[in-house]
């Protein structure tokens, strides 16, 4: 190699040791790449050098031979000894390997080459026949029956280490199938209770088969049949089972199917969620359900609202709405017109409020003269009022809430709603007022909108039952968390949005139970059912919004003070002693009570003991708070501090005031609704207070606090959906700072162990699975529970 180097500058450095060093470095690098890929040499070559992956291996080839109608397939087993100078794989018949590796010295190489074939012969009777007869070394002409037998065993060959080369059409597995088309005919007037036409046909791909072609298929030998110039797979038994199932359903639906039933079928769910006779996985493979032209157009609009015709709101909003917000308005307008429910589940801060206000201005101009109803948490009444005054002052609004309307006016509304609601575009009320003003349930509204709709996730709650009695042809829910912990959250939302779509609670449970038993794509039918009615955009998606800075979440680990650690150990022992002999509700109550005490103690010993002292030096979290907030104060930035305990909000505020050198603000459940907006406005001013301490439930939803660039979760709710909503008070449109989220975790305690569960729970919510941290803890055995709450003193005091 050195002799072939041309004369060049620096050639004197190109020596044998230099070349050896380069080769050695290259070898080390390649070995490192193979190791880091985690795929081994074979997987690494397959990904990085697919041609070299074939060298030294046996391949089975199957090709078509149209010149022989009786034997239209050809088989050949080959091996690839090398690549050509043009970097092409050089295949040779496997028989050549017997010649190339002849002799005792080559026996080991031959055994290594043929070992995948030997393994395949042990797993496949078909390959064993080829090996025993010696036909494996010969080119073979096959009938369709033999080719089909080969094709069905390809996974076995590949698992044995053999490379398989097949006709491209086999990848798509062309099959005749029973086709169901729903909603072909255009509906002149449509709503959720409308009927859709239902058509059964026999099809190959998108083409309908004639009766004669179907008889030909059913009369042919199973396996591969040549139809319309292409080979198709035929399984008469499965085809017959699928046809029988859908014919039976066709007889039941002579007048068509309801919209809800049609949507279930299109999603892969049974027409009746409680029906145990829905097709099995094998029958599903040999049938399909698709929307007709009219229904397909409508569903495409729902799933891709970017292409919808523009719905024009009032002129005041023309230059205010962002592109994605206008898309949301178009989508809400379409579903409202169709009489279908809509779940606007945009991330916190993307402007769900303004999208609804824009829709209301459209309804004012084009809809009936009935008013719309907005149902809100009490803490958001002032927020909605301010947003309406800012963006849609032409909307004529009335408030059914004592914070905005005198009692005598509320009484007159109750006495004569029709009269008092004349010349009204929208009525705003709260969930609690639905129970105290039952006349709201008797009014025929044009539209009902629920804000923070997770308020109805408990179907047994009185306010949920009241909400579901509201009367309106169109319904909208606003929520950033359609599913917080359990699938029943989703069911309750859709029981309001699209009554009947998810069946009764019992039917829904049975449906989910059947989904759990599926081997693949378990929740695909459920996602398919609800997806057309949910529009969710994330603010982390730069295609949606470009002026919102990224948020960064970090865990702020805290130790325990000496007194904290001592009390923690005592709590652990007390809990262990009291658990002995308890079961049922008493045990559950004890576990929940002690979990709360551990949380309180991790905050501060005085919170647990109730002595009112709150000495900063006795709490690891107060020490950590000082470290973080001293730096925040030095930068003249602002911070939100969330806690779930009202009793510690004032001690935290007093401590922070000593750090910042000035007072801050506090908001909790006891803060008057009318005072909240004043507090928010003060904090939002550039010269406003530097910190805001909020109880998580009172301040975790519906507030704009973008003046803060830091969010601190002083204690953990053990529910990521609730925590994220609180964080989003700062991480919203209008935020021009990077938001840093600090989540406090006490080392060596239950908080550190629960921290991992929070991450698991986030994934559960994403996958629409059930779960709940505290519920799970109460169901643990005593030993498991004590392991979870045990104190690691080294971590806690280290």
Image (cartoon, helix red, strand yellow):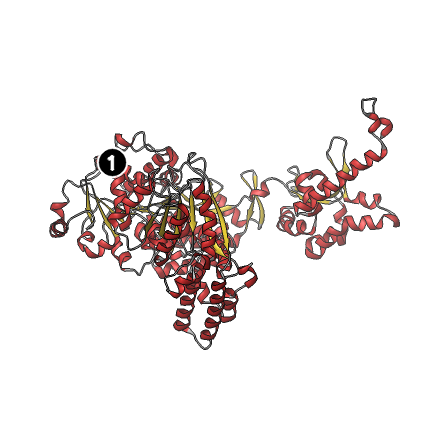
Query: Of 74 and 107, which appears nearest the observer?
Result: 107
Outermost residue toward the bottom? Answer: 581
Query: Of 121 and 536, which appears nearest the observer?
Result: 536
Q: Residues within 10 Å of mark 1 (few under 14, many from 20)?
A: many
Q: Position of residue 554 (x, y in %)?
A: 49, 48
Q: Does any portion of residue 372 appear in the rendered image?
A: yes
Query: Of 635 and 212, which appears nearest the observer?
Result: 635
The image quadrant of residue 647 is bottom left
Q: Quadrant of the N terminus?
A: top right
Q: Position of residue 78 (x, y in %)?
A: 74, 43
Q: Quadrant of the C terminus?
A: bottom right
Q: Position of residue 252 (x, y in %)?
A: 35, 54
The image quadrant of residue 174 is top right
Q: In this rendering, would 795 be left or right of 287?
A: right
Which residue lies under the disc numbered 1?
392
Q: In this rendering, would 279 be left or right of 309?
A: right
């Amino acid at each position: 190699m050195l002799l072939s180097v041309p004369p060049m500058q620096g050639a004197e450095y190109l020596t044998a040791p230099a070349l050896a060093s380069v080769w050695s470095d290259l070898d080390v690098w390649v070995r490192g790449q193979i190791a880091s890929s985690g795929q081994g040499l074979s997987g690494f070559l397959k990904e990085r050098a697919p041609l070299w992956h074939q060298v030294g291996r046996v391949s089975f080839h199957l090709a078509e031979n149209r010149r022989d109608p009786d034997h239209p397939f050809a088989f050949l087993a080959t091996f690839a000894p090398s690549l050509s100078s043009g970097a092409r794989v050089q295949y040779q018949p496997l028989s050549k390997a017997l010649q190339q590796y002849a002799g005792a010295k080559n026996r080991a190489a031959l055994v290594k080459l043929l070992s995948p074939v030997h393994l395949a012969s042990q797993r496949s009777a078909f390959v064993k026949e080829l090996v025993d007869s010696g036909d494996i070394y010969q080119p073979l002409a096959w009938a369709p029956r033999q080719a089909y037998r080969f094709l069905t065993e390809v996974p076995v060959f590949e698992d044995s280490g053999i490379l398989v080369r097949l006709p491209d059409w086999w990848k798509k597995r062309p099959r005749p199938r029973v086709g169901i088309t729903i909603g072909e005919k255009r509906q002149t007037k449509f709503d959720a209770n409308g009927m859709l036409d239902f058509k059964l046909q026999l099809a190959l791909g998108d083409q309908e088969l004639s009766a004669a072609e179907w008889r030909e298929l059913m009369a042919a030998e199973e396996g591969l049949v040549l139809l319309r110039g292409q080979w198709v797979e035929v399984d008469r038994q499965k085809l017959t089972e699928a046809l029988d199932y859908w014919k039976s359903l066709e007889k039941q639906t002579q007048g068509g199917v309801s919209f809800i039933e049609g949507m279930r079928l299109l999603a892969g769910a049974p027409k009746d969620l409680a029906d145990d006779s829905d097709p099995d996985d094998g029958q599903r493979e040999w049938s399909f359900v698709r929307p007709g032209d009219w229904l397909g157009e409508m569903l495409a609009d729902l799933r891709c609202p970017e292409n919808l015709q523009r719905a024009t709101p009032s002129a005041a909003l023309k230059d205010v709405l962002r592109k994605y917000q206008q898309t949301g308005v178009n989508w809400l307008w379409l579903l409202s017109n169709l009489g279908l429910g809509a779940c606007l589940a945009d991330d916190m801060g993307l402007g769900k409020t303004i999208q609804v206000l824009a829709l209301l201005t459209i309804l004012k101009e084009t809809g009936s003269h009935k008013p719309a109803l907005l149902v809100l948490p009490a803490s958001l009444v002032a927020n909605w009022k301010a947003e309406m005054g800012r963006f849609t002052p032409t909307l004529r609004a009335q408030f059914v809430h004592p914070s905005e309307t005198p009692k005598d006016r509320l009484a007159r509304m109750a006495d004569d709603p029709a009269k008092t609601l004349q010349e009204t575009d929208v009525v705003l009320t709260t969930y609690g007022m639905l129970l105290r003003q039952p006349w709201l349930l008797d009014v025929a509204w044009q539209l009902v909108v629920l804000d923070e709709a997770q308020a109805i996730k408990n179907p047994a709650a009185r306010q949920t039952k009241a909400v579901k009695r509201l009367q309106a042809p169109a319904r909208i829910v606003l929520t950033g968390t359609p599913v917080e912990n359990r699938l029943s959250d989703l069911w309750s939302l859709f029981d309001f949005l699209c009554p009947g779509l998810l069946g009764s609670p019992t039917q829904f449970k049975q449906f989910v139970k059947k989904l759990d038993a599926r081997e693949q794509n378990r929740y695909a039918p459920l996602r398919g059912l609800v997806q057309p009615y949910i529009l969710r955009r994330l603010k982390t998606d730069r295609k949606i919004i470009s002026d919102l800075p990224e948020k960064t979440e970090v865990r702020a680990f805290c130790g325990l003070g000496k007194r904290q650690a001592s009390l923690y150990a005592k709590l652990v022992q007390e809990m262990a002693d009291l658990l002995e002999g308890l079961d049922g509700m008493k045990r559950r109550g004890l576990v929940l009570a002690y979990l709360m005490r551990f949380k309180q103690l991790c905050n501060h010993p005085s919170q647990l003991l109730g002595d009112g002292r709150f000495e900063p030096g006795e709490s690891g979290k107060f020490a950590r708070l000082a470290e973080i907030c001293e730096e925040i104060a030095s930068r003249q930035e602002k911070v939100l501090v969330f806690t779930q305990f009202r009793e510690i909000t004032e001690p935290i505020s007093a401590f922070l005031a000593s750090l910042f050198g000035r007072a801050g603000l506090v908001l909790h459940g006891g803060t008057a609704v009318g005072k909240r907006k004043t507090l928010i406005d003060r904090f939002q001013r550039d010269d406003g207070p530097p910190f805001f301490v909020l109880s998580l439930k009172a301040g975790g939803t519906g507030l704009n606090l973008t003046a803060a660039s830091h969010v601190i979760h002083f204690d953990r709710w053990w529910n990521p959906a609730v925590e994220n909503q609180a964080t989003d008070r700062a991480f919203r449109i209008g935020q021009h700072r990077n938001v840093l989220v600090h989540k406090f975790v006490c080392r060596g305690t239950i908080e550190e162990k629960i921290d991992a569960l929070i991450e698991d729970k986030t994934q559960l919510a994403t996958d629409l699975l059930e779960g709940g941290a505290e519920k799970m803890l109460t169901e643990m055995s005593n030993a498991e529970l004590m392991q979870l709450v045990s104190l690691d003193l080294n971590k806690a005091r280290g």
